[in-house]
Amino acid sequence: MALHKGPGKPDERPMSVNPFFGDANPVVEMTEAPPKNRLPDGPLPPTTAAQIVHDELMLDGNARLNLATFVTTWMEPQAGALMAECRDKNMIDKDEYPRTAELERRCVAMLADLWHAPDPSAAVGCSTTGSSEACMLAGMALKRRWMRRNADRYPSADARPNLVMGVNVQVCWEKFCNFWEVEARLVPMEGDRYHLDPQAAAELCDENTIGVVGILGSTFDGSYEPIADLCAALDDLQARSGLDVPVHVDGASGAMVAPFLDEDLVWDFRLPRVASINTSGHKYGLVYPGVGWALWRDKEALPEELVFRVNYLGGDMPTFALNFSRPGAQVVAQYYTFLRLGREGFRAVQQATRDVARGLADRIEALGDFRLLTRGDELPVFAFTTAEDVTAYDVFDVSRRLRENGWLVPAYTFPPNREDLAVLRVVCRNGFSADLAEMFTEDLRRLLPELRRQSHPATKDREAATGFHH
């Protein structure tokens, strides 16, 4: 996403706003709209300011129809009310808000138990603003542990730390490597393998590898990476070379799906090589943005020097986060959701979402114009592309035309070595019902005759065809 920039020219808006926006007399002091790019000279009535902002936000897309995002777009009104009660509480002020801090602790304990920590009471973790921050914290811990093991030669020219991962990782891992000066070693895609290959990852490891990242639910196609096979390949590497390389599981989405729907899949702390796991509470944790979670197997996995303690807010408070001030509302909402659903409730919600994804994938395949890459049977997410005999239009044309009906479906090309492959991806979430999926299918079906009549795809610049670039 591009950074916001200032206005290209001074803001001059001599137009009037709707006189009814005024609080009392509709013709007094309403002759000119307030400026957009500088502070107004004076205040506005609250109803006027709220109406102006409301009207502009109407031009945003409908979040419930956004099939690009993994982020939760529906919660119960009771959750919204609890969040409103807590939005003024700063999470860092644990001494002032001890019950909010206790709910955070309980969430960490629940996740440690859910992810089979050897001793859930000894696992350590924290809430974050989302998985991106959680990944940064996990990466920092991996690097610091590597620095400890290599204190006799780091820093030096022959000791540049590296992190091994598939080319399909979320962009936050690229940011981590850039910000914390770690070499990113990426396993490319090959053929019909759209994520990391365990053996290829092990072959990229050396004495400077701080860890390997496995993705439980690739954002590109919704597939799980084989975490157990990755750990086995690294076990073999250690037996052959002595290199002991830890694994971090980026479970941004899958860590809140697999425990309920794929209980026999071994991917978590049951694998001794898994040192840390993150997830997004605001994805399949079913909470509005933004909340994430980072957990470490035990205290040894999180170097103590990374944890800061402050006392000027009252008490002695340990903190491990990139952000200092943030509201407690999302953490409270996460605890509410855990309490509200329990294991069986989560299982029912995630199963319903997976069923919607599978059913929608089958109906799209039945249209005959598309080829499925995945079917929504791991994450409730699937990717598809146009069939080989379709030449009149491409996935970017489909994305553009669906947007005309309010559906936001990203179209994008895959990374190396599959830049030739362009796909559409559908993310099914709680709140995207079977009825909505049926309406989506009907809209897509209605578009096809016109798309088939095109002489050629209308897309000239793939990068400009969509705002979605990952």
Image (tube, rainbow, N blue to C red):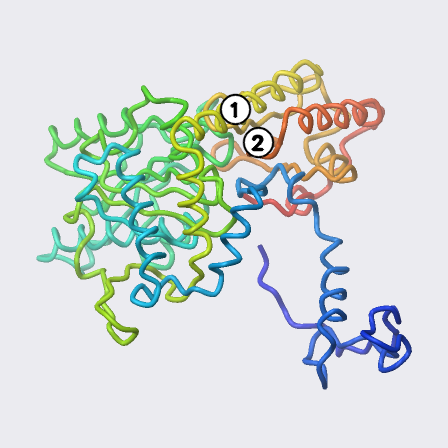
At x 11%, y 28%, the residue is: 239
From this view, report whether residue 214 is shown above or below residue 23.
above
Mark 1, residue position: 354
Judged left or right of residue 18, residue 468 is left
On the question of residue 306 being in view, the answer is yes
Task: Return the mark for residue 61.
Answer: none
> Residue 432 at what x, y percent from top left?
62, 32
- Tell me where residue 411 sits by quadrant: top right
Mark 2 and mark 1 in contact? Answer it, CB < 8 Å: yes
Q: Is residue 182 toward the left or the right of residue 437 in the image?
A: left
Three-letter code, disc 1: Arg
Number of other residues with Cα within 10 Å of mark 1, as a class: few under 14, some 14 to 19, many 20 or more: many
**Residue 408, position as x, y percentages in the image:** 67, 39
Q: Label 2: how many residues lie within 10 Å, few (<14), some (14-19) or many (20+)?
A: many
Asked if residue 199 shows in the view, the reply is no
At x 23%, y 46%, the residue is 210
Q: Secondary structure at mark 1?
A: helix
| 50 sits left or right of 344 in the view | right
Q: Which residue is mark 2?
A: 428
Q: CA distance from mark 2 to mark 1?
A: 8 Å
Q: Residue at x 39, y 26 (%)?
A: 260
Please identify the residue farthest to the right as the structure is shown: 27
Q: Residue 324: image x %, image y %?
A: 37, 66
Residue most extreme to the bottom: 41
Q: Element under label 2? A: loop
Task: Look at label 2 and name its amino acid.
Answer: Cys
> Is 85 placed above or below 241 here?
below
